[in-house]
Amino acid sequence: MRILIAEDDPGIGDVLEYSLSHAGHHVRRTSAGRDAIQLSPGFDFLVLDIGLPDMDGFDVCREIRKSSNIPVIFLTSRGDEIDRVVGLELGADDYLTKPFSPRELLARIKAVARRTVAMAPETGLILDRPMFSARFAGRELDLSRTEFELLECLFGQPGRVFTREQILDAAWVDGGCVTDRTVDAHIKSLRRKLAPHDCIETVRGVGYRFKAL
């Protein structure tokens, strides 16, 4: 998964980045709450420290929840029950009190990911990232890994126009020799699999967007 870490302690941040990267995840770090809000749409998971220097982690989560269902695990030195309750009521998926082991965090991330499903009621589209599976209008879609990443990118922010370059960055996480025509070919294949529903719209001269039916 693409995991964003919002943690201002360099030592803890180093350990988390190493552990999550070693486990095969794509990791980016920030020490600022405002950066976490701006960056979160491009990630699958957020590990969020409550005690950030510019914003309280609770406020960060509250702001993110206005537009995103990204899974969130809070990290905090606060062990009070009221803090745990507040964090969960704000929409956090789990809560980990410092000190903790990276192995425990990895286990909790896996547990949250297993139960995290993205749904669009308007279209009946269900994406299950841990299984890389998708159901649409009651039927299973036979998607390649790249097609899944591409669909999740567009579906994650319906109505937003993504340029081909942004789609390449989001869907081709392993890099490789790809071009704009590669994106167009995968969009064409994805449209075939979503037919007869027309949910991916071409914005001429810009790129593509997912539209609700």
Image (spheres, rainbow, N blue to C red):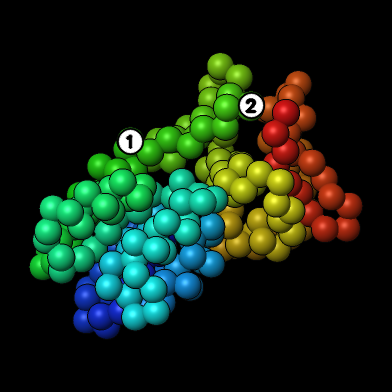
Which residue does the image show at 74% across and 53% down from the upper left?
161
Helix, strand or loop under label 1:
helix
**Amino acid type at image mark 1:** Arg
**CB atoms of marks 2 and 1 within 8 Å:** no
Q: Is residue 53 above or below residue 2?
A: below
Residue projecting furthest to the right: 204
Q: Which residue is mark 2?
A: 123
Residue 10 is labelled as none
User: Whole-percent x and y of residue 94?
Assistant: 25, 49
**Amino acid type at image mark 2:** Thr
Q: Quadrant of residue 96?
A: bottom left
User: Whole-percent x and y of residue 47?
Assistant: 32, 61
Image side of residue 45 versus residue 142, left or right: left
Which residue does the image show at 27% across and 83% down from the upper left?
10
Which residue does the image show at 74% across and 59% down from the upper left?
163
Q: Is residue 153 above or below residue 125?
A: below
Q: Is residue 139 above or below residue 95?
A: above
Q: Which residue is mark 1?
A: 115
Which residue does the image show at 47% across and 59% down from the upper left?
63
User: Whole-percent x and y of residue 43?
Assistant: 48, 57
Helix, strand or loop under label 2:
loop
Mark 2 and mark 1: span between their CA atoms?
A: 21 Å
Q: Quadrant of residue 15?
A: bottom left
Q: Earlier in the sequence, mark 2 or mark 1?
A: 1
User: Whole-percent x and y of residue 199?
Assistant: 73, 33
